[in-house]
Image (cartoon, rainbow, N blue to C red):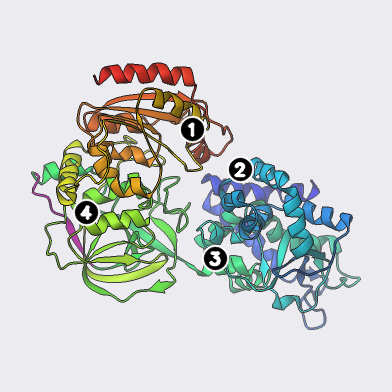
Amino acid sequence: MATDNRYRQEIKILTDYSHGSGTIEEYELLLSRMEASIEPIEVGEEKVGDESTPVIPIRFKKLIYFTEETGFPLTTADRWKILGLILKTRGLSRWLSFNFFSSQIKELERSYFLSRVALFRIMFKNREVIEKQIEMHVRYLSDLEDVERIPTVTQNDYFRAISGVKMILPKVFILSTLGNFQTDAKPAAKHNPKQEQEFAELIPRLMEQNAKSLLHLLLEFNISDRLIEYLRLNYPDACTYLENHVALKTVRMETADLTFDEIAKEQKFRLSGEVVKDVEVWHQRFLVKGNTLLEFDVAGSHRLPFVAGHWQYTVASEVDGERLFIQKPIISELGLAEAIFLSNRADENWFHFLLDTLPRYLFLKDLSPEIPVLVREDLPATTKEFLYKVLNRPIIELPASSSIPVGKLHLLAARSTCFDTVNEEVDEQVKFSPEVLKLLVNWITTTLKSSGSFEVLNAAYFRRSSRQRRTINAHKIEKIVKSKRIAVIEDNEFLYRNQVGIFSGLKLAVIPGGAMLANMIFMRPGGAILCLRGSRQNNLELWRKLADAVGLNYFEVVGPATYHGRNALQRDHSNYYIFAAKFRRTLSVVMRSIT
């Protein structure tokens, strides 16, 4: 509590920054105090740090992780001390869970997306496994020889972990307990230990409070070499994060806020795209020209509070709305003279690929067949198979975290169908383009010319085997479906490879809410969709609006969600329970409507 009171003003400034409610003057004040915390302290005529008095370096009390088994048993007291440090330290439990415990406990692969309560519930349920891992690999030491040679890992590794790529680390490294510090030597008699402690703990205290916001604040300003050196010595991963980001100004392209239909009507349906010269494609989805990022989709704007597929690469400036910070690519590809850009923020999701990205190709498909098209390398295998079938031109798959210069890039700037979050610029969160969707369906079905290597069905229920947005009592729902002689479709690769053909023959589809519902665009007009989904605070009516756009009757059964925490994204993706009696009644009504 004393530490909180001591740094109350500084913590408030950092909190205000994280909420976008502070001022530049306050931010500069905080930075100046951070600078002062590492400057030599005057004591009379002496200074800590001059030739006669060496600087007292800050050292962590250490939690050491050995990737190999150490073979040294822990006492019960040691084990509880380690567990206490892990639970006490912000971000450390997630970091350990993601990087190490997840190899033993599958649920912990999503450590960075779980609420703290859910994380601890999983850890408690698997406490014997966790304790065994601690017994084999983790040690607490108050000191360690050659400490400078061992990388210090803090919660700031969050930024690397959330990208989904596990880090490559040496055999032994330090897990920082952040606020728990000690010094190498006792201060001289003339020095004020309390004052030195206060100076020494400011940056660590801010780092413990909110490392993410602190690093973003440092990105906003030109910080001194002394502060950079301090971070390099004490928070090397934080220093790496700062050095790996660059500031870009942003320019929104002219049609980035128009729907596909609005652009098509302006062109009187003589569809064509546009050309950008001498541009680089970063991270498969960003267009960078010089020191400018081109916004080609207003639904992916950095000005929004959150954008799926962008947040792990970009940080919006809280000081300048026309500027953002973006992670530098680590892979440089050979340049191309000419290419078609067919990539966007969340293409790994079938809904976003089918309805947000692929329609752009309708405006570009009449270009010379020799011009290659750029897509993401990490698309699902079945999506890439689909692309190779429908695109009659060379395809270049862009690796993650890459940059590729293109002399002449063809693209369509337009808004995607749905904003993840909204701000004062967003007039309507969901918009579809019925006319372009008709053109899209006609182009795909004509190109594929599905011969029907599967049974043609009139009605089908689609299983959902994913961890999120799943009906937890699906066995009861399937029992009712089978009693109505509705086919049950397995959630597997056969479905993904044949989803266009399967949906083309359907008059009724019963589907748990998710990307599979995007395939309703292939169904016969006049058919019916019965969607099963969980209740949520933000009701977009996404699927109802899509059904209206393609001429289908929409029905839904909404059940209580299983997650009610503060994480809005997790609430929207929560599993749910469907009341069987309510489902049975609704299904009977839907079936009567299509007979």
User: From the image, which quarter does the C terminus lie in?
Assistant: top left
Q: Earlier in the sequence, mark 3 or mark 1?
A: 3
User: In the current view of this chain or complex, which residue is farthest to the right?
Assistant: 189
Whether residue 552 appears in magenta in the rendering, the answer is no
| Closer to the eye: label 2 or 1 | 1
Q: Earlier in the sequence, mark 1 or mark 4?
A: 4
Residue 157 x, y percent position in the rendering: 60, 61
| Closer to the eye: label 3 or 1 | 1
- What range is drawn magenta here? 269-277
Calculate the distance from the C-alpha at mark 3 to the C-alpha at mark 2.
24 Å
Of 580 and 269, nearer the camera is: 580
Residue position marked by numbered label 2 in the rendering: 115
Q: Secondary structure at mark 1?
A: loop
Q: Secondary structure at mark 3?
A: helix
| Closer to the eye: label 4 or 2 | 2
Kind of residue at badge 2 = Ser
| Closer to the eye: label 3 or 4 | 4
Residue position marked by numbered label 4 in the rendering: 412
Residue 474 x, y percent position in the rendering: 48, 31
Calculate the distance from the C-alpha at mark 3 to the C-alpha at mark 4.
33 Å
Q: Secondary structure at mark 4?
A: loop
Residue 236 x, y percent position in the rendering: 63, 70
Calculate the distance from the C-alpha at mark 4 to the C-alpha at mark 2.
38 Å
Residue position marked by numbered label 1 in the rendering: 471
In the drawing, what numbered circle is on residue 241? Answer: 3
Kind of residue at badge 4 = Leu
Q: Earlier in the sequence, mark 3 or mark 4?
A: 3
Q: Are marks 2 and 1 in contact (CB under 8 Å)?
A: no
